[in-house]
Amino acid sequence: MSFLDSLAEEFNQDTIIFIGSGVSVPAGLPSWKKLVSRLRDYTQNLKGNVEAANVFLEENDLIKAASALTSELVVLGKSLADFLMNMKNAQSFVPLNHRKYIA
C-alpha cells in the first residue's frame, strides 16, 4: 500500500485536506510563471502588443503581466477562455496517480 493510499485510509469523509500552491506543478500543470509566459506567447502570436507584459515578467510581477495580457486579448477580440481552450487543445493533461485523491 502506498503512502497516499495509507493517508487516504487514515482520513474519513468528514475530513477536508486543503492543498495550496505548489501542487499543480507536480500534478503536471504549468507553474504561474510558465502559464503567464505561455499567455504572452499566445498573445504575441495573435500579433498583440506584449511589451508591457515583458517588462512585468522581467520584474517577476506575474499579476501585472497577466493583467496586461488579458487586457490586450480583449483588444484583439479574444479572451482568457480562448487562451485556456487553446492550451487545453495543444497539450494533454494526463492525470497523475496522486490526483485521484484530490476531489
Image (tube, rainbow, N blue to C red):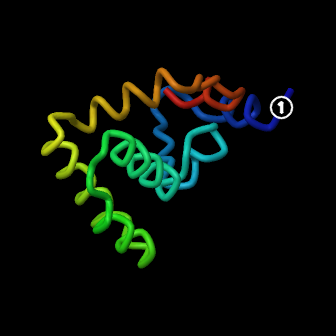
The residue tagged with tag 1: helix, strand or loop? loop
Label count reads: 1
Q: Position of residue 1 (x, y in %)?
A: 86, 26
Disc 1 crowd, CA 10 A, few/some/many (<14, 14-19, 20+): few
- Relative side of 21 to 85, left or right: right
Which sits in the foreground, 83 or 95? 83
- Asked if 56 appears above or below 68 in the picture, the reply is below
Say left or right for 61 vs 2: left
Q: Which residue is drawn at 28% across and 66% down?
A: 64
Query: What amino acid is found at the position of numbered circle 1 in the picture?
Result: Ser
Left or right relative to 90: residue 7: right
Vertical comparison of 79 with 71: above or below: above
In the displayed orientation, state which residue is furthest to the right.
Answer: 1
Q: Position of residue 16 (x, y in %)?
A: 46, 39
Looking at the image, residue 99 lies above or below residue 32 = above
Question: Which residue is labeled 1 in the image?
Answer: 2
Task: Decide which of 12, 55 is in the foreground and name it.
Answer: 55
Return the residue found at the far front: 47
**Residue 9: x %, y % from top left:** 68, 28
Q: Where is residue 6 in the image (x, y as percent from the top left)?
A: 76, 33
Residue pictured at 27% horizontal, 38% vertical: 80
The structure residue drawn at horizontal position 33% and vertical position 45%, both measured from the top left corner, is 43
Q: Residue at x 27, y 31 (%)?
A: 81
Snapshot quadrant of residue 28: top right
- From this view, report whether residue 79 is shown above or below residue 51: above
Residue closest to the eye, 91 or 27? 91
